[in-house]
Amino acid sequence: MSLAYVASPYTKFVDGLDAAHEVAARLTGRLLASGVIAYSPIAHCHPMAVYAALDPLDIPIWYGHNLVMMRRCDTLIVAHLPGWDESEGVKFEIDHFAKAGKPIFDLDPVTLKMVRRQ
């Protein structure tokens, strides 16, 4: 069974961090309902930041955690949400998966249509 990593904007999301979490959680849930087993750092880690009083912008904590998760995941899904193309985190994730030679898919968050990058 394959595990996908869902890249989406967080600090660059137009409506803020809580909204970024809500959108990522909904999108990842929709992917799960459609048969895609996925990990979203925003959907899964934002609640930890909130409830454990961690700084959601503490890059070393989150990049370290998510680097381990990226190594475990088989493919990357880049959600084209507002701000995705300006996000340093999404750029880092794309670069990591590209260097690892793992498949990368661009996702339309409305239709869930995915197109594999060449």
Image (cartoon, helix red, strand yellow):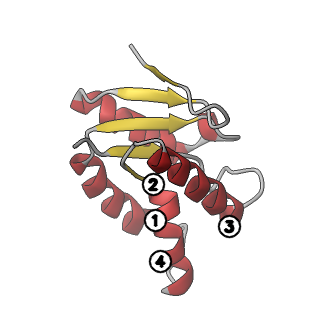
Residue at horizontal 58%, vertical 49%?
Answer: 27
The Cα–Cα distance between marks 1 and 3, rounded to whole angstroms, is 12 Å
Label placed on residue 40: 2
Tell me where residue 24 appears, x and y as whole percent. 58, 54
Crowding at label 2, few (<14), some or many (≥20) Cα neighbours within 10 Å?
many
Tell me the element at label 1: helix
Tell me where residue 57 appears, x and y as whole percent. 54, 66
Q: Amino acid at mark 3?
A: Asp
Residue at horizontal 55%, vertical 48%?
Answer: 30
- Between 3 and 81, the one lying in front of the other is 3
Do the residues under discs 1 and 4 have CB atoms within 8 angstroms?
yes
Q: Amino acid at mark 2?
A: Ser
Residue corresponding to mark 3: 18
The Cα–Cα distance between marks 2 and 4, rounded to whole angstroms, is 13 Å
Residue corresponding to mark 4: 48
Label placed on residue 95: none
Q: Residue 26 sits in which quadrant?
A: bottom right
Residue at horizontal 63%, vertical 56%?
Answer: 11
Label placed on residue 44: 1
Q: Amino acid at mark 4?
A: Met
Q: Is residue 74 above or below residue 9?
A: above
Residue 58 in sight from this viewpoint: no
Tell me where residue 19 appears, x and y as whole percent. 71, 61
Crowding at label 4, few (<14), some or many (≥20) Cα neighbours within 10 Å?
some
Residue 99 in sight from this viewpoint: yes
The Cα–Cα distance between marks 4 and 3, rounded to whole angstroms, is 12 Å
